[in-house]
Amino acid sequence: DMVRMVKRLTKEKKVGHGGTLDPIAEGVLPICFGQATRLMDPLVDGMKLYRTKVRLGETTATYDSDGTIVSTADPTGITRQDIETALINFTGVIAQIPPMYSALKHGGERLYALARAGFAVEREARTVKVSRIEMREGELPDRGLDSECGRGVYVCSIGHDLGIALGCGGHVINLQRRKAGPFRIEDGVSPDALAEAVAQGTWHELIHTPDTVVQNIPAATVSG
């Protein structure tokens, strides 16, 4: 949706993005123009920072607040220590089963399309990396999490699986990507701000140089 909007506003033909966001998510979505679209892979592969709020005691079909509640349990006896202990198993290189409501393909069909049609298929666990998860303050049944994740991590799956580990179920009710590669949410441009810049003819001033994406890669200086 964002790529289509950016194309419509800027009239640019070659536009791509550096990593999808879940339907309930907001935050940083890098947009690449022209030959900079060749740099999307480092963005997709790069680390991302997420701020999440998980509601314990309710499991949904989509692992987030967009889905119907399929089970409930009382989370009042769960302590902060219980959650911190459970989170240890979600840190590092872990095996994660993608949710049915995801953009992965099975037999040429998107999983979310199959799920909406009432089908469920077996999904193989994938190896992903979660560098860290830190719990923020909050009152049950809601708990906030900050996480730093690599490519392919489904943050909503972490919320769902955390609920299972705690024995009460859980789902994500808020999800914000605060950083993707070198791009931070504080430096982001909202759709409204982009539209205003296009109207004023100043939107090119919002573009970062392509080498911004690769500045963290070690450089080698060579002679002629």
Image: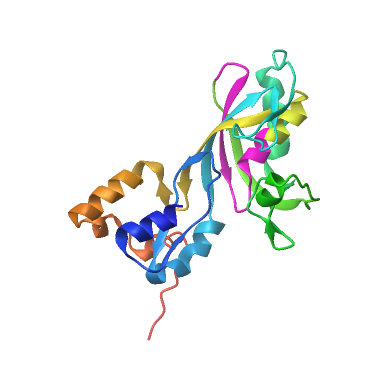
What residue do we see at 72% from left, 35% from top?
161
Q: Residue 72: percent from the left, percent from the top?
A: 73, 21
Q: Is residue 145 one of those drawn in magenta?
A: yes
Q: How is the image coloured?
A: rainbow
* Residue farthest to the right, as pictured: 122
Which quarter of the picture shows residue 203? bottom left
| Left or right side of 119 for 214 | left
| Most distant residue in the front direction | 117
Compare residues 140 and 24 and report the one nearer the observer: 24
Judging depth in this view, the residue of 177 and 121 nearest the camera is 121
Residue 100 visible (yes or no): no
Q: Can you name the residue that lies furthest to the top here?
A: 76
Residue 86 percent location from the top left of the image: 72, 30
Total labels: the figure holds: 0
Question: For the C terminus, which image quadrant?
Answer: bottom left
Q: Which residues are magenta?
A: 138-159
Question: At x 31% / y 44%, what residue is drawn?
Answer: 192
Q: Quadrant of residue 106 in the image?
A: bottom right
| Relative vertical location of residue 51 with respect to residue 139 in this rendering, above or below | below
Give how far across and how far down residue 168 sits, in percent: 75, 23
Observer-nearest residue: 130 or 67? 67
Confirm whether the magenta stretch covers residue 115.
no
Name the residue: 61% across, 41% down.
Answer: 155
Give the side of residue 26 with respect to residue 170, left or right: left
Q: Is residue 135 shown to the viewer in this render?
A: yes
Q: Nearer the viewer, residue 53 or 69?
A: 69
Taking 88 as reference, is 39 above or below it? below
Position of 26 compared to 148: left or right?
left
> Extreme left residue here?
200
Residue at position x 54%, y 21% in the image = 137
Q: Position of residue 38 (x, y in %)?
A: 47, 70
**Where 88 falls versus 224 (above or below)?**
above
